[in-house]
Amino acid sequence: MSLDDDVEDLLQETSEQAINRLAKLSLVQYEERREKEAKTLKFRASALDKMVAAARKEDDALNDDVVTSDKPYDGTVNGVELLDEIASLITKHVILPKGALAAITVWIAATFVYNAFRVFPKLAIISPEKRCGKTTLLDILASLCCRALIASNITPSAIFRSVELWRPSLIIDEADTFLSGRNDDLIGIVNSGHTRSTAFVIRTVGDEHIPQRFSTWAPMAFASIKGIVGTVMDRSIIIPLRRKTVNEKVKRLPIDFKADCDTLRQKLTAWAEENFDELKGNPIEPPEIPNDRAIDNWLPLFTIAHVVGGEWPEKVELAYIILNSREEEETAAIMLLRDIKAIFDATNWVKVHSATLVHELIALEERPWNEWKKGQPMTQNSLAKILKTFSISSKDVRTGIPEANKRGYRKEQFNEAFERYIPDTAIQSAAVLQASNVEGCSVIQSATNKNNVALLNRAKPSDIKGCSTVALENNKSKEVMRDEGVF
């Protein structure tokens, strides 16, 4: 057997790992899979039952002091009433921006069913300064999310070992202290947990350095002053907090808040077990926007909202519009493309020398090009280096003026980059949302933005009867959105 074969065998799931994996399933999920798994492992089903039960007892004993495993609520759970109760509880203790309440409420519920989805978004709670309610919101998440594990810092190895051992919802404060710099190993591990099929890292363990696969597939929420690294933000639903005004009042969290939430977590556990298969088999896609990653991030929330029903599909849809209408912090490369496009549009140039283009960029006010590197202006070489990442290279350009045959660019070279990275379409918060009468569909139209582009005629299948519609003119919808903090 070759070395490659040895490594491949080591990476395969062992019988012990399979038993531990099965022990983590709910009783319903295990019963559905036990015969197939027993056949695969070449065990008798009754023997597998005993081994899985023993693993569950060992797992529960290990986890009792770290994460809370809640038993399902003994009674009927109404999804609408459950989410309404959670939303009401949150608003008593924290001031949220428009659209955030629905997103946070459904994300909490999603932590109980994240295995039903291919992609699961992180929750990034961002504030410009301290004392904006981040810690309070994290305490609420830690009290309501499935198997929550809260910490103020974490190392790369602690993430994948915690996920492998406890299957927690990771709630991390002070993320700006370790996710805003160049901690590439940590950032890579966090990012890997976004998509289920890639949510693994491989590390060597033991004195013999045997390679072992560790899971990174877990819900994660981060709180940070200012932003965290862009790749993590891109995989997150972003909640931008602001400091409350003197007229905005909230209640302090009681010392036994998590214990007070026991019944809510039990209800979420029961609801999750009852609806897991429907959620897994009937994903609901959000409206199309230029950001494909945002569509992936919001799919679990849309799916849960449509299964819950009531006003929740409309609430989540409105939150999606509002939170994705906020201008993203652009990278320097995208900012450069946008400024070059503005220069071409303002001058009607079809070609330009590199020196002239750099001169125009440096002249722009409130842009970084005049102090690009160590306080010095951008150079032609700096410009060329950035544009090369978009497959745009300088060429000999003749403009018809003396000494004009120099290196430069033609406008047509930028067309593809402009189209791909600074499209004219961008979802904006709506001034008017118009409802559709199409049965079984939800159609939302946003107000025209500064680029005269609107989100139009979005019709997606729904798993609930009737329509998911929003109309600001409708008094009932106004009340709903006022509850959401929109008004």
Image (tube, rainbow, N blue to C red):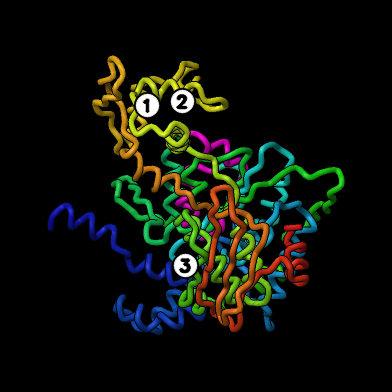
Q: Is residue 166 visible?
A: no
Residue visible at 42% across and 58% down?
195
Q: Return the residue nearer the eye: 249 or 390.
A: 390
Q: Is residue 32 magenta?
A: no
Instruction: Tell me, yes or no, whether the highlighted magenta stretch contains residue 161.
Output: yes
Tell me if I can see residue 102 in this picture. Answer: yes
Using the numbered discs, state the Cα–Cα distance from disc 1 to disc 3 in whole angstroms: 42 Å
Depth check: give the residue in front, 453 or 247. Answer: 453
Which residue position is annotated with label 3? Answer: 117
Tally of marks: 3
Q: Is residue 273 left or right of residue 48?
A: right
Q: Amino acid at mark 1?
A: Leu
The numbered mark, 1 or 2, whose residue comes first in the sequence reads 2
Q: Tell me which segment is drawn in magenta.
A: 154-181
| Structural crowding at the residue carrying mark 3, measured as other residues with C-alpha within 10 Å and reported as few (<14), some (14–19) or many (≥20) | some
Marks 1,2: beta carbons within 8 A:
yes
Query: Which callout, 2 or 3, points to the residue nearer the camera?
Result: 2
Residue contact at pointers 1 and 3, CB within 8 angstroms: no
Secondary structure of residue under mark 3: loop
Distance, label 2 to label 3, CA atoms, is 45 Å
Q: Residue at x 38, y 55 (%)?
A: 200
Q: Looking at this rendering, what residue extends furthest in the front direction?
A: 400
Q: Position of residue 243 (x, y in %)?
A: 75, 42
Q: Residue 220's image quarter?
A: bottom right
Secondary element type, mark 2 = helix
According to the picture, the residue beneath numbered tag 1 turns out to be 383
